[in-house]
Structure formats: structure tokens, C-alpha cells
Image (tube, helix red, strand yellow):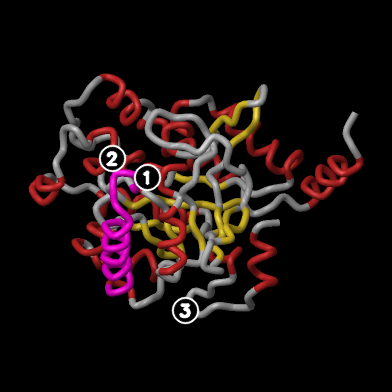
Amino acid sequence: MLSKDKEKVRSNRTVSPPKHIMTVDVEDYFMVEAFAGSVSRDSWESRPSRVVMSTRRILSLFDRYNVKGTFFFVGWVAHKFPELVREVHARGHELACHSYWHRTVYSQTPDEFREDTQAAVRAIEDAAGVKVFGYRAPSWSITKDCLWALDVLAEEGFTYDSSIYPIHHDLYGVPGARRFPYTHRLKDGHSLLEFPPATVQVLGQNLPCAGGGYLRIFPLAYTHWAFRKFQEDYGKRVVVYFHPWELDTEQPRIREELKSRLRHYTNLDKMTDRLEILLQTYSFQPFRELVGVKRDSSLQTTGETARAAIE
């Protein structure tokens, strides 16, 4: 039997489901961590880029369903294709930071991380002329060993982060981290809003459910079940994420070990249809709508808006 609180949540969500969060990590197919052993950063310039074409495909899809999202740009992409950054902004979406070189945070020193982040922010802001407020680490690589990165982000003026994945994984994850949005209180008095990617709890384990390879590989019925859990049981918003290359079935194939190839290429041909079903079924918004950032990058109200973002 449901508790009164849970019954109330279910009743509220049935009448007025929350607007979930739609995010895109704008990187090219050859930048992924799964291929880091085979693709050097020195070779990026010489490789055929697909990111402009595949990102525009996403923009058209979002336009069809009148959806606005948050686009986390790799700085290298923003520097090389500033017209793409401007186009994303002009079409009403939020711009945010996804590092410059797509290096894992835990492989860097604090100074290296700060320099990389500053370079990425410059590239994005110079391209579009608007301020960046959000950050997402490459490969969810802010782990318990490099939580100092949150202090750096706060010092650099970020309002929110979406990097801490509360799961077990061989490349990333903070299994004991909170599953729903919360505020980091940092040692120097700064604070930073944290928006974890969506997970559902099954038999005491946190399972990813609405992004990237998990969205491509897990059955669509599981994804819908997870959305219902968020709406009816948790009363929370789902943070969805994916990458432009996941909609690109014609991208060049990279020679890598089997596990890496399975992670990257499985069900690429299903991703567009699955994404379109989500866009048809649920309502979405960018992070800026929660944290009180206007499209012209001036902040709205402070405390009230920030508190509302994590409720």
C-alpha cells in the first residue's frame, strides 16, 4: 500500500507531469574515451568531422517537437565550428561547457583542469557572445578522487554541474552519491548545483536509464518504466543525455577492442527513433529554466530559483 506522501506525488504527477531535462554532449565520434587508446588528439584535425551535420540533425528534430535543450560543447568543437555554436544559440537552446580536449578530469591536475575549462569557456562564449553557466565532465569523470574539480568550477563562476553519475562503472561513477539534484556547499563558501543523470534503484542498486548507450541498448520499455518511476514515485525530473554521433549510422568505424566497439556502435540505427518517441511522449526543457538563467545570460532571482531547481 502506498504511503500518503507517495500517493500525493502520484496524484500530482498524473495531473501535471514535470518537464524533464534534455541535454546533448556536443563532441565528434572520434573524441570518445572508448577510443582514446586508438585516436590521439593530434590526429583530430586530420579526421573527417561529422559533428556539424549530426548536431543539425538534432536541431531539426528538436524543432519538430518544439523542444529546447542544453548543449554541452567540447571547446575544440566550438573553436573549430563557431558557426555551429551560434546556430544552436540562435535556435533557442542553452550553451554549456563539456571541457576543451575531452580529457577525463581524474587524469588531470587541478591547474590543468582549470586551464582546460577556461579555454573551453572562452571558445564557447567567443563564438556566441553569451555567458556559460553549466558544466559536464567528459565521460562523467568527476569521481570521488577528484571532487576538488567542483571547487574549481565554482571559482570559475559556474552555476551548476551535471557530472556525477551515482553508479558503478569501470570508467566513472560515484556509487554513493545522491541520485537527485542537490547543492554542493564548498569549503570557501561557494555553492554549486548538481544535477545527476537519471538512475532508478533496483534491489538496492542504482541503474542508469535515460542516456547515451543505456538509452540505445536497454529496451525502450525499460526507459518508459524509468520515466514513470520519476514522475509517479520520485516526483523528480529525468536528466536525459546523448551525443550527436549516436544518431550517425554512417560515421567512420574506429578499430578498437570489442568492448569499446560494442559500447559505441550498438543500436546506432535505433537511436533516432527512440529519441523521437521520447520527444513525442514527454515534455523537456534546458537546465537554464531550472537555475534561473535567462537566454540573454543575465541571472533572474537567486535563492528562490536555485531552491526550486532541486525540488
Residue 114 sits inside the magenta stretch: yes
Q: Residue, x 30% and y 39% (percent of image)?
A: 248
**Where 268 falls versus 180 (above or below)?**
above
Mark 2 sits on what residue? Answer: 32
Between residue 148 and residue 124, name the one nearer to us.
148
Quadrant housing residue 47: top left
Residue contact between numbered discs 3 and 1, judged by CB atoms under 8 Å: no
Q: Is there any visible trace of residue 85 in the rendered image?
A: no
- Three-letter code for the amino acid on which mark 2 is drawn: Val
Please, what secondary structure does the residue beneath circle 2 have?
loop
Estimate how packed mark 2 is, as few (under 14), some (14 to 19) or many (20 or more) residues with alpha carbons within 10 Å.
some
Residue contact between numbered discs 2 and 3, judged by CB atoms under 8 Å: no
**Where 232 falls versus 61 (above or below)?**
above
**Where 141 falls versus 194 (above or below)?**
above
Nearest to N terminus: mark 2 or mark 3: 2
Magenta range is: 105-126
Mark 3 sits on what residue? Answer: 296
Please state the total of marks drawn on the protein image: 3
The answer to whether residue 51 is left or right of residue 303 is left
Q: Position of residue 205 (x, y in %)?
A: 61, 26
Residue 301 sits inside the magenta stretch: no
Q: Position of residue 279 (x, y in %)?
A: 54, 47
Q: Main secondary structure of the magenta part?
A: helix
Tell me the quadrant of the picture where the C terminus can be found.
bottom right
Please, what secondary structure does the residue beneath circle 3 have?
loop
Nearest to viewer (mark 2 / mark 1):
2
Numbered label attached to residue 275: none
Q: Residue, x 51% and y 61% (percent of image)?
A: 160
